[in-house]
Amino acid sequence: MTEGYPDHWEADVVLSDGGTAHLRPIRPGDGEILREFHGRLSPESIYYRFFSPRPHLSDRDVEHFTTVDHDLRAALIATIGEEMVAVVRYDRLPDRPETAEVAFLVEDAHQGRGLGPVLLEHIAAAARERGLRRFVASVLPENRRMTRVFREAGYRAEQRFEEGVIELVLDLEPTETSLEVMTAREHRAESRSIQRLLFPRSVAVVGASRAEHSVGQTVLRNLLAGDFTGPVYPVHPTAVAVAGVRAYASVLEIPDDVDLAVVAVRADAVHEVVQQCASKGVRGLIVVSSGFGEIGEEGRARQEELVRLARAYGMRVVGPNCLGIANTDPEVRLNATLAPTMPGRGPVGFFSQSGALGIAILQRTAERGLGLSTFVSAGNRGDVSGNDLLQYWEEDPATKAVLLYLESLGNPRKFARLARRLGRRKPIVAVKSGRSTQGVPIGHAARALTLPDHAVSALFEQAGVIRVEDLSELFDVAQLLAYQPLPAGDRVAIIDNSNSLGLLAQDEAVALGLDVRPRIDLGPRADADDYEAALAAALADDTVDAVVALFTPPTIGGFDVRVPEKILRLAAEAEKPIAATYLGTEGMPADLRVAGPDGMAAEGSVPSYPSPEDAVRAMAYVIRYAQWRKRPAGTTPNFEDVDRDRARALVAGRLAAGGGGPVELVPKDAAELLSCYGIEVGDEPLPPGDAHAVPTRIVIREDPSFGALVSFGIADETAALLDDRAYRLSPLADVDAAEMIRAIRTAPLLLGHRGAKRVNLKALEELLLRASRLGYDLPEVARLELNPVMADASGVTVREVTLTLDRPLGPRPELQPRRLT
């Protein structure tokens, strides 16, 4: 019997309609809420569960259902507020100790919200933890909803029909299908939860003060000035009206439904407001109030309680200490922010963690003429995070490109997974602050990163994220992605009317590794017809993939005002991107803008940059992204000679013998574990001064934020001093392994530098793939170092190994059931 309450089984989850619920193991004290739950069930639901009428639960029933040992018998309940709305349980079969009978029951009013599937995910994970390998479920044939939950879970299943009952047998080992199903459900639920925030039918502003320039009044006036399409309800304890709109003393007194509440009261009053919003049935909260995690431990506790309470009652929270959210869709026109300036409609989604910086971001966005689809400032990021927005933007037809200003990464591995998927369809441009510290701002619900900053950049690159240096570059790249097509390659044509500008652009392009076609210098007397002819020729040239057009006021003769008209006309018809330096302007100048219905820039508009270097740099970022997007996603090979069961048994045995702490394996034991993955360790002496072999170094380690991580580099002091290593997340795909080897600055040593023979790259890639798989399959491998790995033309030989085992924090997150973190 397992002692103690398994509190790690508790979880907040997002349901399929975007609401939230809390899952936890059942407790002996849950008898009363169990009776109330049963009393709300329809006779049909009771019959489907118990195969007989049972209108009431006896005292014996209640004691049996609420008293479990979390091993032979376990149960999880779902609660919303103080009410129990669903339950799932398993009972281990005495004659089959690795098998348990499973059943679940969902209150009629909450059926169809995805509670059944998410409960099954969590009870399956709990069962695997307790050593169970399969579930059996007995279902009446007419109970199609429950049958569908089991069949659609993605586990390997068998079905039998006996005596009028369907018996389903589910193998609990996660499969590729079950993981895909779980990921798809997570995506739909989290996307829906953000959609509910961004498309409210009504908004209440709690703390709508009559004081000029107060936080509450500012949000209220911005909502009204933005012409929000639904009703707005100011909430003030004594005022009859605020900003000319009828006010209510509390949310509870508002006569109509409220979808979204903007909370702008003192931090110590937020708790009461959240309870009122829960009673009112509010679906989402924007907490602009400060005084939470950013002020220290007391505020952090207040923040955690805010999030716990909101999620318990089915609400998502943006904030606290945030700027707010905005949606420029004409169907909603929502400006629930403190920002005095809101950009117009456009194809860019923007997520910012900083509230204070958010005002400046929106100001600069508007100044550049860059249009936004949606904007979210998460502040302390207590609940809603950038990952949630990635889920939403993936399916949002109004968003063509995504911009992120990140101060922390709450779930880095999930971020990488979502970004890699979204990046195949829409570009993601990110500024990640804290390069020098990798720290986390006070108040953020996230841990500090332990990797060096260049490693974080490498992992962003693996996921296809365009990481830029600062906000200026963020906007530079965004305006090109938003309105111009992606380039097919890296061949760039430069057209100019100033030799100096042209040379600056050419130098920058060469420095960034672009293939510069012969520069077209039109001279200072160039007119619109000259530009039209040169640009048309470049766009028609099959050896050109992108164009940088530079135009400065001529020092000789007059300014031909037709130049922008010619550029814009050709750009509108082109399938190649054009970036301009037009009269030193920045953003989307009116002269180079294809005007949309509201006057904002539309597709085909040409972005302008104040300097040639800025234009070329933005184009280079876009080119690298386009090349990543065209790159095959690759496959993670399944090596048939890998013996995972034997490897897991070896790890369990060594950890048990070590008494539970970190265990460094002796060379013989390390070699035995590696052999389970087809990796052999050479025992012959290393030839002195072998000039034909290149010493390399492979490290697999368990990172607290990113999980299993692989690094690769040359094994010498110079490479160590330069920290010349490539990093990728495990498990590696074949293209990842190939890229790692070529990503280090010392890669020429492996590729035939100065006439030397190329090493056997295929053998080196296979070793990386096998070591990566070992680290991913065995989270107990805290650190594995293969150093040196001697690589030459004939193959690779692992000479020395150090391997440390330790108790993992838990199974791989991607193998765990969905939960809000």
Image (spheres, rainbow, N blue to C red):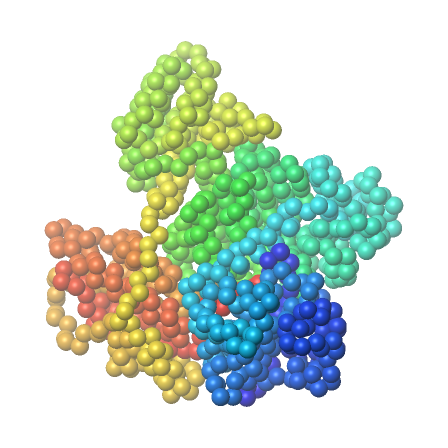
**Direction from residue 713 to residue 659 in the image, left or right:** right
Query: Number of numbered discs present?
Result: 0
Q: Which of 792/749 is in front?
A: 792
The image shows residue 693 at horizontal and vertical percentages of 15, 63
Q: The N terminus is located in which quarter?
A: bottom right
The image shows residue 404 at horizontal and vertical percentages of 51, 48
587 is higher (above) or lower (below) than 693: above
- Kindly give the residue lying farthest to the top in the view shown: 557
User: Residue at 47% across / 33% down in the picture?
Assistant: 483
Q: The C terminus is located in which quarter?
A: bottom right
**Direction from residue 63 to residue 93 in the image, left or right:** left
User: Residue at 44% across / 48% down in the picture?
Assistant: 423
User: Residue at 35% across / 69% down in the picture?
Assistant: 775
**Direction from residue 461 to residue 316 in the image, left or right:** right
Q: Quadrant of residue 290?
A: bottom right
User: Residue at 49% across / 42% down in the picture?
Assistant: 401
Is residue 612 in view from this perspective? no
The image shows residue 292 at horizontal and vertical percentages of 67, 60
Q: Quadrant of residue 544?
A: top left
Q: Which of 272/677 is in front?
A: 677
